[in-house]
Image (cartoon, coloured by chain):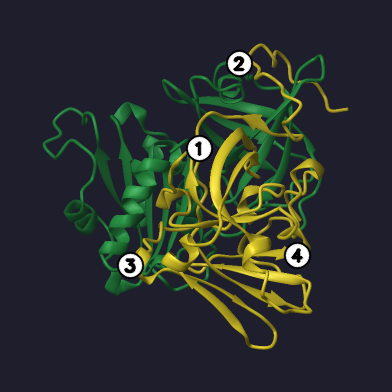
Amino acid sequence: MIVADWRPARVLEVVPANTHAKILRISVPGWPGNAAGQHVDIRLTAEDGYQAVRSYSLASYGPDPVIELGVDEVPDGEVSPYLVEDAQPGDELEVKGPLGGYFVWRPGGEARVQLIAGGSGVVPLIAMARARADAGGPPFRLLYSVRTPDDALYRDEVMRLAEHGIDVTWVYTRGGPPGWTGPIGRIGPNALAAATWPASDAPDVYVCGPTGFVEAVANELVQLGHPAQKVRTERFGGA
Amino acid sequence: MAAFTRGFGARRRESDPNLPPGQYLTEDFPVLSAGPTPRVPLDSWAFTIRTEKGEATTWNWDQFQALPSEEITTDIHCVTRWSKLGTHWRGVSLDTLFADVNTDLDFTMVHSYGGYTTNVPLEELLDGQAWITYEFEGEPLDPEHGGPARLFVPHLYFWKSAKWVRGIVMQAHDDPGFWEQNGYNIHGDPWKEERYW
C-alpha cells in the first residue's frame, strides 16, 4: 500500500451529529477508495502558511471519492474545533490516505464480528457496519457506550442497524433516554459478556474509543477468554 | 503550496524548534496499541538476543536489573503526530546487551510479548542510540506504556520502541515488522517524516 502525497479536497456538507460533533462529507478528487476502518490525515493551512495535521477515522468505505468523517470537538484542540465550529461547504483542505492496514474489516470472511465503541470511537465501526449491511455476511453485533443519548454520533443510523440484522446494545454511563430502566454506568464484565459474542464463537472483535475505555474493555475481553490476537483496538486521547 | 483553509489559524499551538515536521506538542502520554495490553509477570519475564548461529543470550528480570543502567532525557515522537519533549527514562543500553553477542548480520527483528514485532537495523540500536527501558519519570513503566520493559529508540518514530519487549533476533534482511506490514514506513525517521509507505 503506497500512500500518495497530499490531495486537495473540498468540504461538501457539514451536518451536526450532536452538540459537540459534526459529520463532514469531503470531496477528494482521485481518492483511491478505502477499506472499512481506515483513517486519513487532514491538513489545514492558514493564510500565513501555518499548517496543522490530525488523523480522523472514516465512516465511509469503498471507492466513492466523497469521504465522510465524524469529528468530535476536543476542547483544547486546534483542528477539531475548526472542523466542528467553523468548517463550511466549499472550504478547502488536504487529505492523505487511506491509512492503517490492521483495524479494518473486509467482506468475505466467515468469522462473526463484535464491534465495541466508546463515544466518537463509533466512527470506524460505522464504516464496518455499513460494509456489512451492503455486502451481507457473517453475524454482527455492536455495543455502543455513550455518556447520554445526546452524546452518540450516528444515533439514528445505529438505531436502524437492526434492519440490517446487526444487533445493537446501548450502554449509558451518565444518563439514559426517557423511560430507560436499564443500568447507568460503565459496563462491567457480566454485562459485557451478556452483550457480546462469547469467545467460543471465535468472533473478530474491534474496540475503538478513549484510552481508558478501550483498556478496560480489552482487558475484560481477554479475561472472558477471547484470544488477544482476535481483539483489535484503536485508542485516542491521553493515558 | 497548499490552498488556504478559509478561517483556519486562530487557534494554534506553540511551535518549537525541537518539534519535527508535522508534529504537535502534547503534555499527555497517548497510547497506541493494536490489541489488548499484555500482563507480563516479572518472575516469568526474560529478554533474549538470538543470532544466526543459533546462540541465545538471555537475562531474567533479576539479571537484567543487575546490569548497569542509564538515565535518559529525550524527546519522543509518535507517527500519529504527537511529540513529548524532555521525557525521563531509565534503562539498559543495547551496547551493554550486545557486548558479548557475536553476529555478522546487519538487521534485527524486535519481538514483544503479545506477538508485536518491529524491524530496526542493528547500527541504529548501538552507539548510545537505544535502550531497554523499565522506568518512566521515576516510576516503573505502566503496562499500557510497555511495562515491564520496552525497547527505547527515540530517534525513530515511537512505534519502533516496541512495548513489552521480549527479545531481538538477528536478521539477514530488513524484513518489515507488524506496523511496517500495515502501512508504516520501513525506517521511521521523524525528521524526514518517514511515516507511511
Q: Name the residue that disc number 2 marks.
A: A86
- Residue A163 in view, yes or no: yes
Residue, x 41% and y 20% (percent of image)?
A19
Could you tell me residue B53's position as x and y percent? 69, 88
Q: For mark 1, what is the residue?
A: B29
- Helix, strand or loop at label 2? It is helix
Query: Disc 3 designates what residue?
Result: A226
Mark 4–mark 3 Cα distance, whole angstroms, equals 34 Å
Which marked residue is nearer to the observer: mark 3 or mark 1? 1
Pointer 1 local density, CA inside 10 Å: few below 14, some 14–19, many at least 20: few
Identify residue for label 4. B121
| Subunit of label 4 | B
Separation of disc 3 and disc 1 at Cα? 27 Å
Q: Position of residue A38 (x, y in %)?
A: 59, 51
Between A238 and B108, which is closer to the camera in this rendering?
A: B108
Total marks in image = 4
Disc with the residue nearer the chain's start (1 vs 4): 1
Image coords of residue A61 (percent x, y): 59, 50
The secondary structure type at the circle numbered 3 is loop
